[in-house]
């Protein structure tokens, strides 16, 4: 039996490939997952009861360190994959330059998942080495082709990746007890931006986490004293700054939790990224992203009717947040009927796997 290799670099990747890997395993496929030391990616993979293999770590906010860590990880992955003594049907990742390079170098078909075309540096590294591309239909193909994707190998679906795992989450109130949350008081989740991502390193205004996330937290606590704020840092520096500033006024989980489950109980999500706000929006929870680009996935969800908002001005974010908390019925959707309108990306993955099996059996 040929093996399918997934490389998961971030918590989002862990949810995506943990869920997808579980589906494939239930269909009789053999799956292996590799990862790196980054945030709580390894802990999330543990939720899926997958044995995973860790190689390398995040390169931080230095371009030199990013390059060195990536180079080091390529070597480790190469030795691991060649030492498996297994035939790999394909490799897949959400924009992993290391997995793409190793797969290409070893002649393994590589499936590129992507919903962040604004990450142009990574796209230039991964697209030319990819065999297939699984991309949400809301992302124009021109933006992919200009960065090296091959038109005839692009498979698109009418949905977003988060819709793969959010409907499968069982609502469990034990998460509230675990975090010490009172369901009778408003709950707000705040998630800062990827301040060490390559596409944000040149933007000075995202480096001072105390002035951005700190401003949002302070304003909400001042204007809505009963609010409970759960803060999910991406990096240790973000954690230290916010923890030192606000101490026990906020809740900061000490370990990985079932984030999508928590989203089903909160009243509002504010994020400098996308995944958590997109998970919440799919559940009908009002979400605001202050990311510097109103990218197509956000626009797509708004057009579909999900309560997903984009606002870069932090004063306006606070104003909108307070209105959402004071008038929840105005913004919150009562059920998940809209989610049924979204296509499942599993169908595209299964189609590619079937095609690859057909080729290897000739």
Image: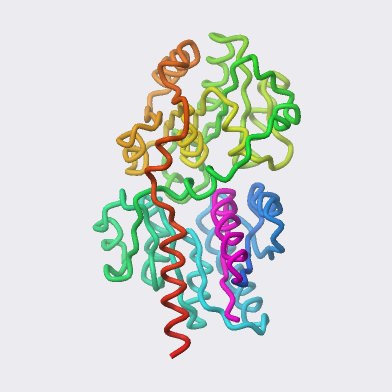
Front residue of 142 and 55: 142
Locate residue 187: give its quadrant: top right
When the figure is inspected, residue 8 is found, relative to residue 335, above or below; the finding is below
When the figure is inspected, residue 36 is found, relative to residue 170, above or below; the finding is below
Quarter of the image where the C terminus is located: bottom left
Front residue of 86 and 65: 86
Q: Position of residue 92 (x, y in %)?
A: 50, 67
Q: Is residue 204 left or right of residue 220?
A: left
Q: Is residue 148 left or right of residue 359?
A: left
Per the rendered image, the range of residues in magenta is 1-28
Q: Is residue 271 left or right of residue 81?
A: left
Q: Is residue 312 left or right of residue 88?
A: left
> Which residue lies at the image location 45% right of the left edge and 23% below the top edge?
332
When the figure is inspected, residue 200 is found, relative to residue 137, above or below; the finding is above
> Which residue lies at the image location 58% right of the left edge and 67% below the top edge?
27
> Which residue lies at the image location 42% right of the left edge and 70% below the top edge?
352
The residue at the far left in this view is 142
Magenta stretch contains residue 182: no
Q: Position of residue 123 (x, y in %)?
A: 39, 60
Magenta stretch contains residue 13: yes
Q: In this figure, what is the number of numbered marks?
A: 0
Front residue of 228 and 104: 228
The chosen color scheme is rainbow
Quarter of the image where the N terminus is located: bottom right
Q: Position of residue 224 (x, y in %)?
A: 56, 10
Locate residue 20: give its quadrant: bottom right
When the figure is inspected, residue 76 is found, relative to residue 317, above or below; the finding is below
> Which residue lies at the image location 71% right of the left edge and 53% below the top edge?
46
């Amino acid at each position: 039996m040929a093996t399918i290799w997934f490389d998961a670099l971030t918590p989002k990747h862990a949810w995506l490939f943990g869920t997808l890997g579980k589906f494939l395993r239930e269909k009789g496929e053999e799956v292996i997952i590799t990862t790196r030391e980054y945030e709580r990616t390894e802990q999330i993979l543990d939720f899926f009861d997958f044995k995973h293999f860790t190689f390398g770590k995040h390169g931080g906010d230095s371009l030199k360190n990013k390059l060195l860590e990536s180079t080091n990880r390529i070597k480790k992955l190469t030795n691991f994959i060649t030492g498996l003594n297994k035939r790999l049907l394909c490799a897949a990742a959400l924009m992993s330059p290391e997995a793409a390079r190793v797969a290409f170098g070893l002649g393994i078909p590589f499936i590129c998942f992507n919903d962040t075309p604004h990450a142009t540096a990574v796209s230039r590294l991964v697209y030319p080495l990819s065999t297939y591309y699984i991309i949400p239909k809301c992302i124009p193909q021109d933006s992919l082709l200009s960065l090296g994707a091959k038109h005839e190998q692009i498979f698109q679906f009418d949905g977003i990746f988060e819709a793969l795992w959010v409907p499968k989450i069982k609502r469990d109130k034990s998460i509230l007890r675990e975090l010490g949350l009172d369901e009778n008081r408003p709950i707000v989740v705040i998630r800062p931006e990827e301040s060490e991502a390559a596409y944000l390193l040149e933007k000075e205004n995202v480096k001072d986490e105390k002035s951005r996330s700190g401003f949002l937290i302070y304003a909400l606590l001042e204007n809505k004293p009963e609010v409970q704020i759960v803060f999910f840092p991406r990096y240790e520096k973000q954690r230290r700054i916010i923890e030192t500033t606000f101490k026990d006024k906020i809740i900061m989980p000490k370990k990985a939790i079932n984030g999508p489950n928590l989203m089903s109980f909160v009243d509002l999500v504010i994020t400098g990224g996308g995944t958590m706000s997109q998970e919440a929006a799919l559940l009908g929870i009002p979400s605001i992203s202050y990311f510097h680009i109103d990218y197509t996935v956000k626009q797509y969800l708004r057009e579909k009717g999900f309560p997903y908002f984009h606002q870069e001005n932090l004063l306006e974010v606070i104003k909108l947040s307070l209105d959402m908390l004071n008038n929840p019925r105005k913004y919150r959707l009562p059920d998940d009927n809209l989610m049924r309108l979204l296509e499942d990306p599993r169908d595209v993955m299964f189609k590619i796997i079937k095609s690859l099996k057909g080729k290897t059996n000739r």
